[in-house]
Image: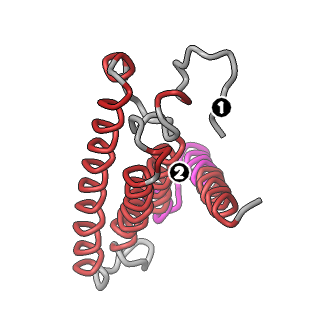
Amino acid sequence: MTTLKAFWRGIEWIIALLMLLTMVLVFVNVVLRYGFASGLRSGIELSRLGFVWIVMLGASLCLKEGEHLAVSELFDRLPRGLRSIIGRLAWLAILVASLMLLVGCWRQTLANWHNISPLTGLPTALFYLAGVVSGALMSVTAALGAVLPGGAGAPEAPGGPETSHHADTAEETRP
């Protein structure tokens, strides 16, 4: 397994662990509330923090895997050269948007680092830090999609239109 694949596999494990911890935390809190008329005061905020990280890391992973929602019927019917140009432009638009996410969340992280939650004792900046990490991951993914020869396809098909789920070939060439 290459280092890059191991890195993304680690992201998948982090998401799975966060989902497990969030589900356990919410379940315990529900049982405590309805069964014992009490609850974990910090449980709601910790589960919300976990959910934010799950969503942001998941969005990065979906962009890398090409699993996000996309409608490509028009794109797939265009000539190969035009698909390459439009595909690269789409990756550049994603790069701009993800850089905006990165910069905006970085500023919010710095602005909120000293705001401490009274329930958990954690900095509220941890919510925005998820956007920094996700923005950085998506920026690298989009930059690679825009410059690599196989990445000139639409963003929903990282290897290009010939490796998308709608390919007319019998074999799946997608890694």
Q: Magenta span has 156?
A: no
- Rendered view: 84 above or below 20: above
State the residue at coordinates (62%, 17%).
Answer: 169
x, y percentage for residue 27?
61, 46
User: In the image, is residue 36 part of the stretch drawn in magenta?
Assistant: yes
Looking at the image, residue 166 sits to the left or right of residue 107; the answer is right
What residue is disc 2 on?
37
Left or right: where 61 falls relative to 140: right
As drawn, 112 above or below 53: below
Q: Residue at x 30, y 66 (%)?
A: 102
Q: Quadrant of the N terminus?
A: bottom right
For the stretch drawn in magenta, what is the main secondary structure? helix
Check disc 2 and give the amino acid type: Ala
Q: In the picture shown, does residue 1 fall above or below 68?
A: below
Measuring 36% from the left and 67% from the top, which residue is drawn there?
132
Name the front one of labels 1 and 2: 1
Of the numbered discs 1 and 2, the one sitting upstream in the chain is 2
Residue 76 drawn at (x, y percent): 39, 20
Residues 63 and 104: in front is 63
Q: Is residue 13 left or right of residue 77?
A: right
The quadrant the C terminus occupies is: top right
Q: In the image, is 61 to the left or to the right of 89?
A: right
Residue on which disc 1 sits: 173
Image quadrant of residue 154? top left
Which region of the structure is painted magenta?
22-45
Label 1 – label 2 distance at C-alpha: 55 Å
